[in-house]
Amino acid sequence: MTMSWWSDVDDDDDDEIYDESAIRVRPNPKANRPRTKRRPAHEDAIIGRVLGVDRGRYRVLIDEKDTTEREVITARARELRRTPIVTGDRARVVGDTSGDEGTLGRIVGIEERTSLLRRSADDTDNVERVIVANADQMLVVVAAADPTPRPRLVDRYLVAALDAGIRPLLVVTKTDVADPEEFLTHFEGIDDLRVFRSSPQHVPIDEIGAALVGHSTVFVGHSGVGKSTLVNALVPDADRATGHVNEVTGRGRHTSSSTVSLRFRSEAGDGWVIDTPGVRSFGLGHVDPDNILAAFGDLADVAEQCPRGCTHLPTAPDCALNESPDVSPARLSSLQGLLETFAHRDEH
């Protein structure tokens, strides 16, 4: 009689036969440890201010309130590859933070931001471009002429500033070339908008400087308006490139190619000047539409008399803005242009 092959096996050997330790395990060819989702706490990280970004490297100022402050070149940690790191960020840095030539630290985290200034490619683009973090003021630089001032572009800056919770300031340059008063009437209804007038014969450095003390101020403006010239006057060692306006097109040439944070010093105190590249457009696709009317403070007061749900567009029935004789036609047109853009965006 034929018997099964296991019939001769002693029952006491069953545990040995079926012991999982006898299973062959594929060796680890790289001899590395298995990945873990746990990240180190980096309790020894040092907090620094991001001064600028250049081709994947970040200049970070360490111990900015100490006499031992130093600039450190850093790279971002792998876990932050999807996190935007911008000028003005408060970064947590580990590794070599000596600042010696050839050393490289690593950014392993970003502190909570107090503000975030953004723009989009256009008003229909919801993808935001982060410009600067932790600024509390925006200095809008516009020329009285050469290039021609654009009130609607300034309106866009003001909307973006309000949306980010940033206080706006306005500097009008080249006042020796043209009288800026007609341009400035467009903004008369804005409460607490401080305006500075500048010309080659009189650059109000002391007045502007006093407004910068204790603040982190981002400078924005159309190319060719003299923004970099103003930055160099306020921060003598900034060495920001300056350009000129093309006589044929009337457009300024881009000179500042990156956003940098510069220390402003004065007898009254210190502050931060954040210079940004000149732009010819400023998309607001990321902005909450409710903040658009709020940026036009004088019009917002009149709009309180509108019926509930009023769109404030030219065709809106019983709209107080369209019927009030005290409303500036130019400002109303600028507001309605923005509102129409957002209305079309929402339809799509």
Image: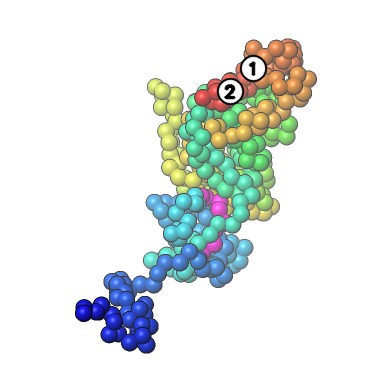
Q: Residue at x 29, y 72 (%)?
A: 26
Is 32 within the magenta? no
- Label 2 CA crowd tier, 10 Å (few <14, some 14–19, many 20+): some
Which residue is depicted at the point 41% across and 23% down?
249
Q: Which class describes the residues within 10 Å of circle 1: few (<14), some (14-19), or many (20+)?
A: some
Q: How is the image coloured?
A: rainbow
Q: Quadrant of residue 299?
A: top right
Residue 263 visible in the picture: yes
Residue drawn at 70 percent across, 20 percent down: 310
Q: Which is nearer the eye, 140 or 237?
A: 140
Q: Residue furthest front?
A: 1
Between 3 and 323, the residue placed more toward the observer is 3
Tag 1, which secondary structure?
Answer: loop
Check residue 87 for magenta coloring.
Answer: yes
- Residue type, numbered disc 2: Ala
First of labels 1, 2 by sequence position:
1
Kindly check if marks 1 and 2 are in contact, taking CB atoms under 8 A apart as contact: yes
* Separation (CA) of disc 1 from disc 2: 10 Å
Which numbered tag is attached to residue 323? Answer: none
Q: Tell me which residue sits at (69%, 35%) in the image.
A: 194
Residue 329 image offset from top left, x and y in percent: 66, 15
Q: Position of residue 102 (x, y in %)?
A: 38, 66
Residue that label 2 marks: 343
Q: Secondary structure at mark 2?
A: helix
Report the amino acid beneath label 1.
Leu
Q: How many marks?
A: 2
Q: Is residue 77 above or below residue 249?
A: below
Find the magenta span and give its range.
86-93
x, y percent for residue 67 = 59, 67
Quarter assignment of residue 297:
top right
Q: Is residue 227 left or right of residue 332?
A: left
